[in-house]
Structures are given as C-alpha cells and as structure tokens.
Image (cartoon, grey):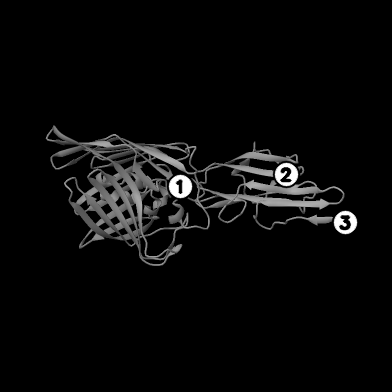
C-alpha cells in the first residue's frame, strides 16, 4: 500500500519540509531548510538591519529543485550568482545571499519558494529575508552619512565609516578640548556575539586653569549584529555597545599653567544602565534609561524618562518626556539639570548621527551616543526645546531636500552656536 506524507506551506514555517512515498522502496520528496531561520519564532526567515548585506541559504534537497521569488519585488536579494534558479538532488546546498542596502525608508521582505521537480505542487518550502528600515545605529537606511560638523564657536567633529556604514573614527575638537576615538569590529572565535573595540587616541580637556590629558584607552563591547523578532529592543539591545569597559589602564596627567604635577591611573567606561518600573515588553508608565560616559574623574550621564506608552521595536518611534543631564567635574563636584523636552516634526533618523546630542555642546557631548551606539538614547525626532526652571535651550534646524540636517542652531541662555553639517 502506498502512503503519501508531505507538508504544505501557506506562509514561512518550520525547518523540516519532507514528503515521502513508500512502496517496495521509499522515495523522499521535499526539503529541509536550515538557513535562514529565526530561532525566536521558529520560521524560515532572517532579519537584518538596513545596512546589512549578507546572509546564507542552506538546505537539503531530496530531488532536483527549482527556485523562484514569490514577492513582487525581490530584486534587492541575490541568491548564489544571481542566476541560480535550479539545482540537482539529493544534495546539501549552501548558497551565498547578498542584499542591497535598504534606502527605501521602510522595512521590506522578500519571499522565495523551493520546489521539488518531482512533485512541485506538493513538496515545496518557502523562506524569506527581511530588512528593517533603520540601520543598527537607529538612523534610516536612506540617511546620508555625516562626515563633518562645524560649529561657529570653533568646534569641529569629523567622522569616518566603513563600507557597511559603521563608524570607524570620530575626532572632536574645540580650543583645548580634543577627543579622538577609533573603532574596529570583529567576531572572536570563542563568542557568538560581534565585538566593537574603541581606542581613544587623544583625550584632552580643560577646567579652569587646569588641562587634563588621558591616554591611552582601549575598550570593547559585545553586541548582537542582527535584530531579533518577538522580543523587546531593550532585551536584545540593537545598538552596538551593550557594555563598554576598559581593558587597560589609562594615564590621567594633570597640568596647571603648563606644569605637570601628577599622574594617576584611571579608566574609561561608556555604558547603558536600566531603571525599570515594569518588566513587560510594552512600557506603560514611567521608565528610565541611563547612558554613561565616564573618563576618570569626569562623567556625563543622561537619564531619560519615558512616561508615554512605548513598544521598543526595531523601527518604532521613541520619544521622551524629560531628561536629566548630570556632569561631574574634575574637582568632584556634580552639576545636575532636569530638562523638559519638546520635539518637532523633523526626523532625527534622517541623518546618520544623533543630532540631539549636540544640545549640550561638544565638550559635554557623549561621542558614543552621538554615533548611535546607544540606540535607546536616540529619540526619533529632533528636540526643539529643552526647558529647565524658567530657562530653556532652543534648537532650530534647517534641512536639506532629503530631510537630512543642513544646519542646527542651539541657543542656551544667550549663547548661540550654529552647527553646519557636511556629508
């Protein structure tokens, strides 16, 4: 007696897709698809940021097969050499997959179908590749890369990137303030996470008549390179540094009026801390995220309060009610200001950097947050006012035709700084 077993798909489902007919001799049909695979949902699909361009298709085919796209527009995905539409079986196949960067400003999916040529209507498998609208740093895939920011107060910020739009260096300068950081990326053989290494090549700042110089500093942070489905952004942390700690001591040299009189060991740390009022995926009431940038005796901390209901998905919009900015000075004193925030309609994701970080000035700007390493610190729209007491900081932006920032002007208690952006 003959028996027929097969699995039909109307959407992307499980990895094992096998059909078989048995008589005197068993004959097998169908596929087992191993990659792409989403371990959270159990579907044959993979998720990527807008600036990620590679993946793998691997499957076991029991017979000769054909491959076709099911989506209206799957042209942004290339499987194999681009002309791979069929193959022989039984065999295990591994094909390279490449994507175009997602510059559409919206998330997208491309669905494909493998068909067993022996029983194409019954034995088939479907899989999908998905790209988010945003890069790993929270900017839109269509956002131009900021190469230089020039303030009319004499400040400059220069940024370089690799071919996947990740920052490779940042150089911040104003008067006696200098901060240069280089970034490299890899995946250690002993880790399932990607790693970013930050090396501070120069860090000098002045306070009163004292100049501080801190060198060298190297720090590393581990992160998940791809977004995850079905989980909160705050759990899977789709920003680069989930924790950044010093791997070697640094020398803090204190110079007063040109004379060096002490040197102490110190370290660098930049990291995110949490203070939750609930533990659900959707935040229903007050939540705080704290972002630290510590260098020896000095630190800047941003404590962000979210009082509105937010679901922190990869492409979801984020808006805060207020932010507490703490700054510890070299003499150990701490300045703390609570700002009530007002946002405009200009999209902070349409420019590669987090422009809101400039409102405190370059010397107190967190370079990691500026580059989008702490994604939860990146509000979706640009702040127009940060009020404290009976005073306020006002921010005005002029946009280019692609909605990226042309100029950003910060007015704070009579001091006005205009920043010009170059791409």
- Observer-side mark, 2 or 1, equals 2
The residue tagged 3 is: 1
The residue tagged 2 is: 61
- Observer-side mark, 3 or 2, equals 3
The disc, 2 or 1, on the residue closer to the chain's N-terminal end is 2
Q: Residues within 10 Å of mark 3 (few under 14, many from 20)?
A: few
Q: Nearer the viewer, residue 154 or 315?
A: 315
Left or right, 121 with reference to 174: right
Q: Circle 3 sits in a helix, a strand or a loop, which is it?
A: loop
Point out which mark residue 6 bears.
none
Q: State the image coordinates of residue 187 (x, y, percent, origin top left).
A: 48, 39
The residue tagged 1 is: 136
Left or right, 77 with reference to 120: left
Residues at circles 2 and 1 in contact by the CB criterion of under 8 Å: no
Quarter of the image with the C terminus is top left
- Observer-side mark, 1 or 3, equals 3
Q: Nearer the viewer, residue 58 or 408?
A: 58
Q: Nearer the viewer, residue 153 or 71?
A: 71
Is residue 37 at all visible to an observer of this figure?
Answer: yes
**Quadrant location of residue 305?**
bottom left
Q: Residues within 10 Å of mark 2 (few under 14, many from 20)?
A: many
Could you give the CA–CA distance between mark 1 and mark 3, rounded to whole angstroms? 56 Å
Vertical comparison of 257 with 333: above or below: above
């Amino acid at each position: 007696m003959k028996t027929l077993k097969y699995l039909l798909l109307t959407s992307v489902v499980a990895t094992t897709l096998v059909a078989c007919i048995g008589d005197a001799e068993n004959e097998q049909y169908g596929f087992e698809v191993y990659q792409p695979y989403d371990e959270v949902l159990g579907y044959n699909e993979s998720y990527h940021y807008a600036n990620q361009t590679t993946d793998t298709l691997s499957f076991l085919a029991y017979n000769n097969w054909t491959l076709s796209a099911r989506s209206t527009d799957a042209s942004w995905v290339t499987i194999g050499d681009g002309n791979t539409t069929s193959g022989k079986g039984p065999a295990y196949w591994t094909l390279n997959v490449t994507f175009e960067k997602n510059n559409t400003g919206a998330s997208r999916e491309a669905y494909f179908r493998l068909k067993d040529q022996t029983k194409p209507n019954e034995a088939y498998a479907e899989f999908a590749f998905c790209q988010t609208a945003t890069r790993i740093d929270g900017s839109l895939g269509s956002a131009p890369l900021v190469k230089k920011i020039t303030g009319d107060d004499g400040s400059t910020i220069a940024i370089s990137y690799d071919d996947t739009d990740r920052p490779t260096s940042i150089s911040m300068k104003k008067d006696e303030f200098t901060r240069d950081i280089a970034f490299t990326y890899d995946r250690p053989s002993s880790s399932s996470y990607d790693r970013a290494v930050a090396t501070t090549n120069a860090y000098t700042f002045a306070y009163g008549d004292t100049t501080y110089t801190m060198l060298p500093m190297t720090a590393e942070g581990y992160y998940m390179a791809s977004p995850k489905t079905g989980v909160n952004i705050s759990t899977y942390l789709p920003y680069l540094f989930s924790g950044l700690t010093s791997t070697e001591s640094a020398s803090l040299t204190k110079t007063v009026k040109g004379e060096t009189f002490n040197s102490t060991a110190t370290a660098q740390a930049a990291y995110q801390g949490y203070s939750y009022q609930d533990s659900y995926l959707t935040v229903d009431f007050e939540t705080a995220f704290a972002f630290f940038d510590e260098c020896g005796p000095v630190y800047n901390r941003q404590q962000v309060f979210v009082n509105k209901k937010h679901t922190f998905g990869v492409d979801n919009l984020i808006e805060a009610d207020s932010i507490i900015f703490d700054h510890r000075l070299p003499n150990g004193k701490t300045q703390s200001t609570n700002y009530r925030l007002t946002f405009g309609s200009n999209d902070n994701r349409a420019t590669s950097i987090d422009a809101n970080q400039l409102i405190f000035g370059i010397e107190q700007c967190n370079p990691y947050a500026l580059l989008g390493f702490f994604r939860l610190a990146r509000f979706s729209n640009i702040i127009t006012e940060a009020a404290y007491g009976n005073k306020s900081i006002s921010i005005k932006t002029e946009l280019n035709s692609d909605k990226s920032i042309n100029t950003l002007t910060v007015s704070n208690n009579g001091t006005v700084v205009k920043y010009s952006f170059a791409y």
